[in-house]
Amino acid sequence: MANDRLQPGPAPFLSLRMIEWSLVAALIVVLALVFMHKVRVLQGQAELSNVKTTLGALRTALVLDHLQHSVSSRGTDLALLQRNPFELLQRRPTNYLGELSRAQAAAAPDGSWMFDPVCVCVGYRPLYAEWLVSPSGEPLAWYQLSGDAGPWQLTAKEAYIWQGQVMN
């Protein structure tokens, strides 16, 4: 009887050890997929934060420029409307491409800022475009430079949504 247990023979295909290792491998794959999804969401949140920071810097520069012109009592002239707000920044963003037309902006690399002097708009092409929801379906977010009395304002041309948050 002792020899019955030691007889060589084919091992069962689905042994308990193979099932255990398969479950461990499946768990690792599921955890890796969840981790990758969370990283993508976090990258999207970081990009939204970067966009809001840049828009905030541009808006602050416009207010400071208005105050500087008010104090110097030169008044505000119409030429200011044509001014690129990125020129008001002490340091331009590294991903700022300069003045581009809408056609050129469509071919711009992802994650780039640009200024369109024709429509007097600041544009942004997202690095992760899947997070941007635009009513027109355009892959860029455009912000119009406008204002009558007071500092110039940057207002979104559409109601952009980024990961469920309004992108203004």
Image (cartoon, rainbow, N blue to C red):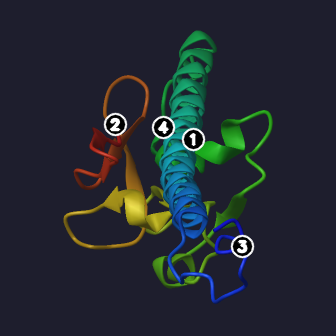
Instruction: Name the element at disc 1.
Output: helix
Q: Earlier in the sequence, mark 2 or mark 1?
A: 1
Instruction: Report the residue marked by disc 1.
Output: 46
- Compare residues 10 and 110 and report the one nearer the observer: 10
Q: Which mark is residue 3?
A: 3
Instruction: Name the element at disc 2.
Output: loop
Residue 19 rendering spot, x and y as whole percentages: 51, 66
User: Hey, what amino acid is under mark 2?
Assistant: Gly
Residue 34 rendering spot, x and y as whole percentages: 48, 52
Q: Earlier in the sequence, mark 3 or mark 1?
A: 3
Q: Is residue 162 above or below residue 15?
A: above
Real-space Cα separation, disc 4 to disc 3, in angstroms: 103 Å
Q: Earlier in the sequence, mark 4 or mark 1?
A: 1
- Compare residues 1 and 55 and report the one nearer the observer: 1
Instruction: Report the residue marked by disc 2.
Output: 147
Real-space Cα separation, disc 4 to disc 1, in angstroms: 37 Å
- Mark 2 against mark 1, which lies toward the viewer? 1
Side of 67 where 8 appears, left or right: right
Residue 127 appears in view? no
Instruction: Name the element at disc 4.
Output: loop
User: Hey, what amino acid is under mark 1?
Assistant: Ala
Q: Which mark is residue 77?
A: 4
Real-space Cα separation, disc 2 to disc 3, in angstroms: 95 Å
User: Hey, what amino acid is under mark 4?
Assistant: Asp
